[in-house]
Image (cartoon, rainbow, N blue to C red):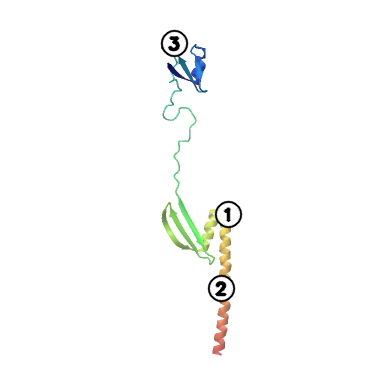
Amino acid sequence: MTVDVLTHDEETASATTEAPAVATDEATTVTESASPAASEDSAPAEPAAEEAPKPKRGRPKGAATASTAKKTRTVELILTVTGTADGEWQAELKNGSKWVAKGLEIPAAAVSRAAKELHSDLSGPIDEVINQAREAQAAKVAALEAELEKAKQALAELDG
């Protein structure tokens, strides 16, 4: 008994031959012969190795290809600016996983200017925080000035 496996394309080409075919699925066909002599009388099977030619290595000629420009190398710098309600600001800078600077004290005015330079969406919320800190400090100054005035009056009464 001989078993030949044909591809779907070969199935349609061998449909005109006299070899009996039994379909096992849509992609392959199995041909059986009862004796070796019967297989010699049937048409020779086409080689199953007929495939599309392998693509050549390298870029295809004439085809639209991706840009040949070099990819831009990105640098990951992380700048973290932290502020407190008292108006104290610190900056930290990290290059990849390495710390460049940590805990640098910076003035609130510099933070405000930098935020305005970067983007208006950044400067709005930062300016709100700075203004709240400014109001808190102004209230603290007013309270201290009132306390200082009371202390001066107490000293004047002791002297007088």
Q: Residue 38 carries which label?
A: 3
Q: Residue at x 44, y 55 (%)?
A: 94
Q: For the residues marked 1 and 2, what is the alpha-carbon distance in whole angstroms?
A: 31 Å
Tell me the residue that label 2 is attached to.
141
Residue 9 x, y percent position in the rendering: 50, 19
The answer to which of marks 2 and 3 sits earlier in the sequence is 3
Residue 147 x, y percent position in the rendering: 56, 79
Residue 101 x, y percent position in the rendering: 42, 58
**Labels 2, 3: front one:** 3
From this view, report whether residue 148 is shown above or below residue 41. Answer: below
Q: Which residue is drawn at 58% across and 78% down?
A: 146
Q: Which residue is drawn at 45% across and 50% down?
A: 76
The answer to which of marks 1 and 2 sits earlier in the sequence is 1
Tell me the residue that label 1 is attached to.
121
Q: Identify which amino acid the numbered label 2 is placed on.
A: Val
Density class for disc 1 (Cα within 10 Å; few <14, some 14-19, many ≥20) is few
Density class for disc 3 (Cα within 10 Å; few <14, some 14-19, many ≥20) is few
Q: For the residues marked 2 and 3, what is the alpha-carbon distance in whole angstroms?
A: 112 Å
Density class for disc 2 (Cα within 10 Å; few <14, some 14-19, many ≥20) is few
Q: Nearer the viewer, residue 14 or 119?
A: 14
The reply to whether discs 1 and 2 touch (Cβ–Cβ < 8 Å) is: no
Residue 29 x, y percent position in the rendering: 49, 20
Q: Residue 130 carries which label?
A: none
Q: Identify which amino acid the numbered label 1 is placed on.
A: Asp
Q: Identify which amino acid the numbered label 3 is placed on.
A: Ala
SS for callout 2: helix
Q: Residue at x 56, y 76 (%)?
A: 144
SS for callout 3: helix
The reply to whether discs 3 and 1 touch (Cβ–Cβ < 8 Å) is: no
Horizontal side of residue 143 vs 90, given as left or right: right
Q: Quadrant of the C terminus?
A: bottom right
The answer to which of marks 3 and 1 sits earlier in the sequence is 3
